[in-house]
Amino acid sequence: MANLVFNVALGRVASLAALPNANDGLVLVPLESSGLVADSTMRDYDTLADLLAGASNEQTTVGRKSLTSVSVTVNDSSDRVESDAADVTWTAPTGSAVGAVVICYDPDTTTGTDADLIPLSKHDVTWTPDGNNFTLSIADFVRASSSA
């Protein structure tokens, strides 16, 4: 589950994770462990371009992954909404250590830049790509609930 939901995504994660547009999608972006900014700073970034313009660096050797089998489920028993996706696997990855991944909403996967990607959630990960396949389990990447 998320370690951080970005301020720009508060109250919007379930709506965006439901993929409301024809060519939209969710993208998983790995960040290097070296240089990661604190959550208190990271939560204020409104686009992926803003995030990457700061001290945090994308781990480009392993590359971004599109999330598949994305679902948003209303769980009446637990009084929450659960946003989920299929696990992600990197085959024979190498490069710098990964300290986190960010899930971003891309409003149009056929066009655009990092300035169009809206960061939804950050997930702490401790992983050093060493050439062995690596699978990241993504179970309920964000759960939203309210208390009355």
Image: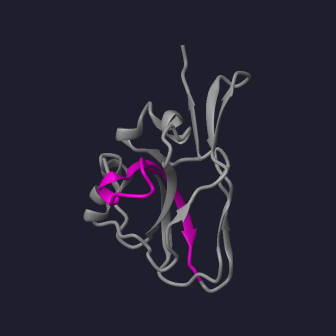
Depth order, front residue of 91/31: 91
Q: How has the structure been colored for display?
A: one colour
- Residue 111 colored magenta? yes
Residue 146 point in image, percent of width and height? 54, 22
Query: How many marks on residues?
Result: 0
Which quadrant holds residue 135?
A: bottom right
Which quadrant holds residue 113?
A: bottom left
- Residue 44 colored magenta? no
- Tell me the quadrant of the picture where the C terminus can be found: top right
Residue 115 point in image, percent of width and height? 29, 55
Residue 83 point in image, percent of width and height? 61, 40
Position of 49 relative to 144 (above/below): below
Residue that appears at 50% across and 57% down? 27
Position of 61 relative to 104 (above/below): below
Visible residue check, residue 15: yes
Looking at this view, name the residue that lies furthest to the right. 77
Residue that appears at 30% across and 46% down? 44
Residue 105 point in image, percent of width and height? 45, 48
Residue interval drawn in magenta: 105-129
Visible residue check, residue 54: no
Q: Is residue 128 left or right of residue 111?
A: right
Residue that appears at 55% across and 84% down? 94
Q: Is residue 142 left or right of residue 56?
A: right
